[in-house]
């Protein structure tokens, strides 16, 4: 069995949560001395796979092998004994202990049964020097920058484990120089024969450091390839699942007459969140927003709705310049917003389906024009039926509904307010096929009824199918606006993958 | 409709109240005897209503706060402040109605202060209200200069000890307050909004609910209720006792709300059931007093009974109990 | 009431309250006084009476409020020692931890008098201790009741202080001693009223219900006056006459109970005098003059007041003291 030459290997891994298949027969092999990027959108199964490789989860099928030998990893500490160390996005060390203590926590050198502090600090200096750090090992870890803490975490993981290093979004909170420094260290470690798994959302970084890449989508392995055989466009296409239907043909009526201008965002932006963008939205059109996770698409939606206040630029509604500093302003203009994180920002889990549907309308009516129970039942019933919400009763807590039905409830909530403009952030993520179809049908219906919609989605086929126009976000910036023939997955993938200096479609 | 309201009556809180009253009756056979005396009802049951009224009133204010995932620790101290204001003002010669209004305004301002700390400065409620819990009693002592300020004002005494249609005034005030607050929160959208903010403040904000205004409102109401309770307690003993008025009652009020089925994690709440919770607590207190137990057992007995009540209401117990509503087959709405 | 009026009243009262014969003179002596704080009305009265007594004797009193903290008291004592005062009065907040600072005072040859509460320290470290006898207070109340009912059967309900507190334990014990000789007087119910008016009232209400509407109660004994004031209101609410239908006897002698006695609604109270300083100054005067060693434990008088002791006048005399 030991013919593979893999330091760490996963074969046919299956992981099931409830009736949701998180990983479906995934293979993954990691060679010594390589940096292997693991890519995929949210929910693709990256973190589940990592947790299985580090022993945090047990697979429901398949096996994990280290150096060709099948092993059972009971927990991350156990995985460490097989040479597998992990560094997470959030440094999980002890900020109020010294650097040396953090390096050796649980493995302190001892003398006569006592911690040999002097030896520990001496050794620490040597270890840290190898990572280019010249800091006092007796200083508090928390006194150093996140980057230094990150490197200490890496040093600890490598010292304790030594064969495999898993880096889970290590660069998320680092600036450009710090990232470069981190990459130098990773390159050095690679030379020593360490196998590195690297998880990130930033394609630039993947191309800068990785040798091979494994792409997951919806719990399935899409491909494992060497990076020199791939272009950025290929990678995006693999991530977003556009390996078929690149014909560019869409069923869109080419010259749909545009409705009146409803919204006009000019140089609209928010510092450290979204670069200023220009966007005009007409009645009766769907503006699709494409872009990878972390590209600024959700942030754009939030400032449009006033969930975060824009700090530059202007917005006009139906030709009149106005201010949208908070959601109530937006709702007053007839906006609605279905957030990406349904559970955290969308539903009121303990409240009934009925209350969840009427809440935004009631919010608009204010404290004192209360809808009575019968009116609430009527409204909830009407919109519930129109959206085909499957619930035993309108009085049951919404948390007992499936994800798809919860999404329909939130959509019904906004439809009940008779909106002019809806922002839907990933409206179809993680929901069943039936609900998915219902929501796509609803988007089309609303567009035909003259609503303006902005829909953010990672499902390119879907976006292409219902969008009148598509804007592409990259690095917190609106980088392209696609019309007519350009509304096809190939062009979108191109736009997402392009470097900043690339052509604007 | 009638069946639904009957079903509502059979909730654990009312059953617990009846249970405690029955235990009292076993320990003291005359517990349920109510006589008419000097133009008012007289008996242990009336004592439960009368003595339970201050905590019930606090609970009416507290339940809204807790439903928003907050807590108001300052109500006991606000009671002392309000009582001190009312008492010192009548002693200084102000007309009683003005003294009462002043005390209520002071209570409202105390609540508003808490609300600002929580809603505007985003301080955790337990810490925000702790400030006034500690400072309030000191303020009350400053107002009374450390005395028990005694008074003979007929209005204040009537509020504390009078009777209306034979029922103790304190209980009547508690009932009226409960009915008004229940109507206001349920006939307007305020109740729904409070629950929405308590369940998920982020979602509430995105759904266009002004959660700040709402928080200011519930904390102000809690302060107002505390002031009302403070005036009653002062009127009852004809004096404002800054050291002892309302001491530890915030804990009884929180307990009443929790016994009334409102989770400390916020969300669903019921004003009437919180009042029932206050009556359960008082029924225990009165029961202990009439039963003749040595006082050393008071706290143990009370803790034991509360433990039983809470266990009966726990999710575990409801899972063990047979389901009351049959699961309905999945059908489309309507 | 403003501070000014209080002081004015206090000045006028000083002579009335001081029972001391001015055998020796303390004029011009500097005496430090470390007070616990002002947690109760009685404590406030003790402070004002002490100041009056000092003024009447021409003592230069250095007052230090410890705000319930022993560390503050120790600091205050060290300060007094450094200033070289002639004597020190202290009302200790706790019983333990005084040995070191008392030794320092002894080495500086400054006599220390304990007020109101004792300490766990060798007796030779302080000159004397002035305190009331809580058991005696209870016994005085009990004996008064036995005399008052004169052989008739009498069921007594008792309103105890806070469970486990030393006044509650001692006053209960003393009262039981006081009525031990009389088989006709017995305690039928006893509950805690936490030394507060409202709890006193609530407990009395319950007692009345469980005693046949109060018909079976002959007297109520409260461990402090505040609870008695609450009980009086409960008795009135039940349609009975306090002081007549049910006798009321309590301890402390705060101003409000004299109003009740004057109105015939309470019958007797036993004084816990706030004048601990008077006997202390007398002892100090004798000691500083010719080294006369006072008794180690000076017990203040536990005086009984009834309607015959000019209750209205007693009220006037006390109301400015800060109760």
Image: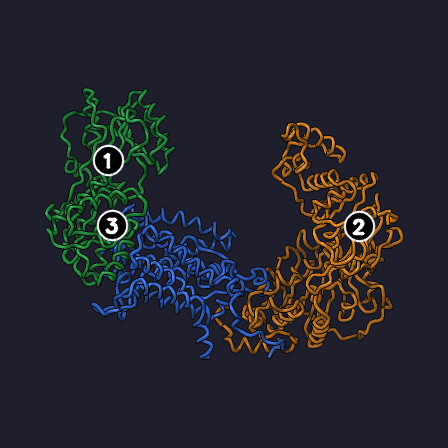
Chain colours: A orange, B blue, C green
Q: Quadrant of residue B95?
A: bottom left
On what subunit does the disc labeled 1 rest? C
Tell me if I can see residue A471 in this picture: yes
| Label 3 element class | helix
Q: Position of residue A8 (x, y in %)?
A: 80, 48
Which mark lies nearer to you, 1 or 2?
A: 2
In terms of depth relative to the viewer, which is nearer, C164 or A41? C164
Instruction: Tell me the CA gap for discs 1 and 2.
Output: 83 Å
Mark 3 closeness class: few <14, some 14–19, many ≥20 residues within 10 Å: many
Q: Position of residue B275 (x, y in %)?
A: 40, 64
Q: Which residue is mark 2?
A: A70
Mark 2 closeness class: few <14, some 14–19, many ≥20 residues within 10 Å: some
| Label 2 element class | strand
Is B35 placed left or right of A11 in the picture?
left
Instruction: Tell me the CA gap for discs 3 and 2.
Output: 80 Å
Q: Which residue is mark 3?
A: C226
Q: Are marks 1 and 3 in contact (CB under 8 Å)?
A: no
Q: Quadrant of residue B203?
A: bottom right
Q: Mark number for residue C131?
A: 1
Tell me if I can see residue C5 in this picture: no
């Amino acid at each position: 069995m030991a013919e593979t030459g893999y330091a760490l290997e996963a074969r046919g891994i299956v992981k099931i949560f409830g009736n949701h298949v998180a990983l479906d027969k995934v293979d993954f092999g990691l060679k010594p001395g390589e940096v292997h990027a693991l890519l995929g959108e949210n929910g693709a199964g990256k973190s589940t796979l990592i947790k299985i490789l580090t022993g945090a989860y047990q697979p429901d099928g398949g096996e994990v092998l280290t150096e060709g030998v099948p092993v059972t990893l009971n927990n991350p500490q156990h995985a460490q004994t097989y040479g597998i160390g992990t560094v997470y996005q959030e440094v999980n060390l002890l900020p109020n202990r010294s650097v040396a203590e953090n390096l050796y926590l649980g493995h302190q050198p001892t003398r006569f049964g006592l911690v040999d502090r002097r030896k520990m600090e001496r050794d620490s200096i040597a270890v840290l020097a190898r990572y280019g750090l010249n800091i006092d090992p007796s200083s508090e870890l928390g006194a150093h920058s996140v980057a230094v803490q990150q490197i200490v975490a890496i040093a600890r993981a490598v010292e304790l484990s030594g064969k495999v290093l898993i880096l889970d979004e290590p660069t998320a909170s680092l600036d450009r120089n710090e990232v470069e420094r981190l990459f130098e260290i990773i390159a050095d470690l690679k030379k020593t024969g360490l196998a590195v798994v690297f998880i990130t959302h930033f394609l630039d970084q993947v191309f800068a450091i990785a040798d091979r890449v494994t792409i997951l989508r919806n719990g399935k392995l899409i491909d494992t390839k060497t990076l020199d055989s791939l272009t950025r466009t290929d990678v995006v296409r693999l991530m977003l699942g556009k390996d078929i239907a690149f014909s560019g043909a869409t069923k869109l009526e080419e010259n749909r007459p545009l409705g009146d201008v409803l919204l006009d965002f000019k140089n609209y932006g928010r510092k450290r969140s979204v670069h200023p963008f220009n966007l005009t939205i007409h009645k009766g059109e769907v503006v699709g927003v494409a872009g990878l996770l972390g590209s600024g698409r959700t942030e754009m939606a939030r400032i449009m709705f006033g969930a975060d206040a824009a700090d530059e630029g202007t917005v006009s509604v139906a030709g009149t310049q106005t201010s949208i500093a908070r959601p109530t302003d937006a709702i007053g203009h007839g906006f609605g917003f279905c957030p990406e994180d349904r559970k955290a920002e969308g539903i009121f889990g303990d409240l009934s389906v009925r209350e969840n549907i009427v809440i935004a309308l009631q919010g608009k009516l204010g404290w004192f024009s209360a809808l009575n129970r019968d009116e609430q039942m009527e409204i909830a019933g009407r919109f519930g039926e129109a959206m085909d919400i499957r619930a035993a009763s309108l009085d049951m807590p919404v948390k007992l509904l499936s994800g798809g039905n919860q999404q329909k409830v939130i959509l019904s909530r906004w439809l009940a307010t008779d909106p002019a403009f809806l922002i839907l952030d990933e409206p179809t993520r993680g929901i069943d096929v039936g609900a998915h179809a219902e929501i796509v049908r609803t988007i089309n219906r609303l567009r035909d009824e003259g609503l303006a919609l902005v829909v953010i989605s990672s499902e390119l086929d879907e976006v292409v199918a219902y969008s009148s126009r598509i804007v592409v976000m990259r690095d917190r910036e609106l980088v392209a606006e696609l019309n007519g023939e350009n509304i096809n997955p190939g062009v979108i993938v191109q736009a997402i993958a392009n470097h900043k200096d690339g052509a604007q479609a | 409709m009638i069946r639904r309201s009957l079903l509502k009556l059979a909730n654990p809180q009312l059953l617990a109240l009846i249970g405690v009253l029955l235990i009292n009756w076993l320990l003291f056979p005359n517990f349920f005897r109510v006589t008419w005396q000097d133009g008012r009802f007289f008996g242990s049951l009336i004592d439960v209503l009368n003595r339970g009224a201050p905590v019930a009133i606090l609970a009416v204010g507290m339940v809204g706060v807790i439903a928003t995932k907050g807590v108001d620790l300052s109500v006991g101290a606000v009671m002392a402040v309000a009582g001190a204001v009312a008492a010192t003002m009548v002693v200084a010669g102000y007309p009683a109605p003005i003294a009462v209004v002043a005390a209520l305004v002071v209570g409202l301002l105390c609540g508003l202060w808490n609300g600002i700390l929580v809603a505007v400065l985003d301080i955790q409620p337990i810490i925000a209200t702790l400030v006034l819990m500690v400072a309030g009693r000191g303020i009350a002592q400053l107002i009374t200069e450390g005395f028990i300020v005694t008074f003979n004002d007929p209005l204040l005494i009537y509020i504390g000890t009078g009777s209306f249609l034979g029922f103790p005034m304190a209980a009547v005030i508690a009932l009226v307050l409960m009915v008004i607050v229940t109507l206001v929160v349920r006939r307007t959208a305020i109740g729904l909004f409070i629950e929405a903010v308590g369940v998920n403040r982020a979602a509430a904000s995105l759904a266009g609910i002004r959660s700040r205004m709402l928080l200011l409102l519930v904390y102000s109401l809690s302060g107002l209720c505390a002031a009302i309770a403070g005036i009653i307690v002062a009127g009852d003993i004809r004096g404002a006792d800054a050291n002892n008025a309302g001491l530890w009652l915030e804990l009884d009020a929180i307990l009443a709300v929790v016994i009334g089925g409102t989770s400390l994690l916020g969300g669903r709440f019921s004003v009437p059931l919180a009042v029932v919770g206050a009556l359960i607590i008082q029924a225990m207190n009165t029961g202990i007093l009439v039963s003749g137990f040595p006082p050393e057992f008071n706290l143990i007995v009370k803790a034991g009974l509360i433990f039983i009540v809470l266990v009966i209401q726990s999710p575990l117990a409801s899972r063990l109990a047979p389901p009351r509503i049959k699961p309905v087959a999945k059908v489309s709405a309507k | 009431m403003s501070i000014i009026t209080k002081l004015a009243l206090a000045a006028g009262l000083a002579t009335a309250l001081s029972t001391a014969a001015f055998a020796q003179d303390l004029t011009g002596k500097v005496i430090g006084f470390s007070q616990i704080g002002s947690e109760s009305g009685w404590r406030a009265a003790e402070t004002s009476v002490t100041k009056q007594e000092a003024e009447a004797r021409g003592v230069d009193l250095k007052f230090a409020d410890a705000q319930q903290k022993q560390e503050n008291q120790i600091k205050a004592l060290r300060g007094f020692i450094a200033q070289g005062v002639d004597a020190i009065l202290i009302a200790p907040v706790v019983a333990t931890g005084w040995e070191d600072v008392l030794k320092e005072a002894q080495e500086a040859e400054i006599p220390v008098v304990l007020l109101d509460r004792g300490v766990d320290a060798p007796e030779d470290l302080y000159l004397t201790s002035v305190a009331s006898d809580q058991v005696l207070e209870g016994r005085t109340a009990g004996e008064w009741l036995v005399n008052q009912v004169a052989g008739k059967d009498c069921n007594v309900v008792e309103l105890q202080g806070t469970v486990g507190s030393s006044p509650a334990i001692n006053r209960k014990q003393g009262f039981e001693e006081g009525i031990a000789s009389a088989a006709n007087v017995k305690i039928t119910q006893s509950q805690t009223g936490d030394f507060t008016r409202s709890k006193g009232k609530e407990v009395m209400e319950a007692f009345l219900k469980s005693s046949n509407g109060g018909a079976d109660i002959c007297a109520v004994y409260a461990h402090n006056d505040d609870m008695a004031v609450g009980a009086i209101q409960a008795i009135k609410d039940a349609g009975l006459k306090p002081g007549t239908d049910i006798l009321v006897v309590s301890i402390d002698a705060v101003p409000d109970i004299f109003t009740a006695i004057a109105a015939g609604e309470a019958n007797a109270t036993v004084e816990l005098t706030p004048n601990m300083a008077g006997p202390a100054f007398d002892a100090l005067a004798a000691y500083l003059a010719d080294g006369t060693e006072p008794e180690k434990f000076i017990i203040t008088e536990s005086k009984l007041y009834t309607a015959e002791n000019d209750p209205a006048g007693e009220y006037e005399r006390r109301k400015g003291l800060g109760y």
